[in-house]
Amino acid sequence: MSSVFETLKERGFIAQITHEEKVKELLENEKVTFYIGFDPTADSLHVGHFLQMMVMSHMQKAGHRPIAIIGGGTVMVGDPTGKTEMRKMLTRKEIEHNANKFKEQLSKFIDFSEGKALMLDNADWLLELNYVKFLREIGVHFSVNRMLTAECFKTRLERGLSFIEFNYMLMQSYDFLKLFQDYGCILQLGGDDQWSNILGGIDLIRRVEGKEAYGMTFTLLTNSEGKKMGKTEKGALWLDPNKTTPYDFYQYWRNINDNDVIKCLKLLTFLPLSQIEELAKLKDQEINEAKKILAFEVTKLIHGEEEAIKAQSAAEALFGKGVSSENMPTTEISFEEIGSGINVIDILLKAKLIPSKTEGRRLIEQGGISINDEKIAKIDHIVKEEDFKNDEIIIRKGKKVYHRVKIVR
């Protein structure tokens, strides 16, 4: 049976690693405590975090102990990595609310019982730090010249990097030192954009404790064109069903580019590699079968099997033209709002199928909107009460986006 190191490597997770042979040996022969950090900048994790959650699950199943760090302290400063401008400052109450949401979502992948994993908030130690003491004991070990060579700072220098953000690397490095000292954590994991911050923590442990710690980063979830996956017309692809419905979540994976299917099956499902290799042999139209499997498996992991079955059934009914609207994303509209009729663009806006009236006009002019399988030809088209069969209409945007609008009487 292959070790978790080999599993992560074979599935394409690993981007960079310090001391590769040593880390491989540790993961094969010892129970390692490792950590990944999540800054609670929103009230839900998104697809970008999903890959990290999969790594934690693979590691825990192999007998290692995860620590999930909720960055209640670091988020009050803001990580400049990948950002072109400073983040909005969150209140402590907002941060706590977001952190609680994260815990719910992480618990689907990680067993936090009986010391098998820990979930900690770095606010517990960062917010109590004495600034002068921190500078004397921690800041003294950091070279400003070296920090400025880090990619996360270089990309911000032209636009302006605030002093508060400049402290982020010190705080994340201190997290690693704190976890090393208090919990025996010797390995930090993260996305490849965290490489500089991880190296900072490893160097700090070596300078303060005179001991070795290790780091491993993972490939960012990008498509075959190198763009980050998980971006939709409605924004990020969230793991919270109230922000991205299970149906929309399923449809995202069902419709990804052919070139990305096998990579996503390896990274985002627990299907055996032997089965994925068989699916990799599918060509042309047959690749759609692999997409269906990917969409179902990923939706099942995030939303549960029941919701995955519902999303799959709704999608198959739609594309099989036996349109079943039961599990379709739905917008309710009052009988009074319809009145003697409502403009089609206003309905599209209400259903959040378009971001603006300009986009609605463009779609209609290009033949991209249908209602009940009838293409809408005019931007001043009026939808009337009689158009609602059994008090509902089915809107199709493009070839693949379906939405139900239902009258509430």
Image: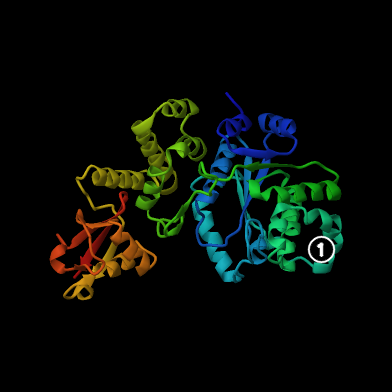
Three-letter amino acid code of the residue under disc 1:
Phe
Find residue 309 and report its image quarter: top left
Q: Position of residue 205 (x, y in %)?
A: 80, 48
The residue depicted at 49 percent of the width and 40 percent of the height is 268
Q: Nearer the viewer, residue 400 or 266?
A: 400
Q: Nearer the viewer, residue 355 or 333?
A: 355
Q: Position of residue 113 (x, y in %)?
A: 56, 46
User: Is residue 170 shown to the viewer in this render?
Assistant: yes
| Structure colour scheme | rainbow
Regarding mark 1 in the picture, which secondary structure is present there? Answer: helix
Quarter containing the C terminus: bottom left
Find residue 51 and report its image quarter: top right
Q: Nearer the viewer, residue 151 or 104?
A: 151
The residue depicted at 71 percent of the width and 60 percent of the height is 168
Depicted 157 relative to depicted 60: above or below = below
Find residue 30 and report its image quarter: top right
User: Which residue extends farthest left?
Assistant: 386
The residue depicted at 44 percent of the width and 56 percent of the height is 240
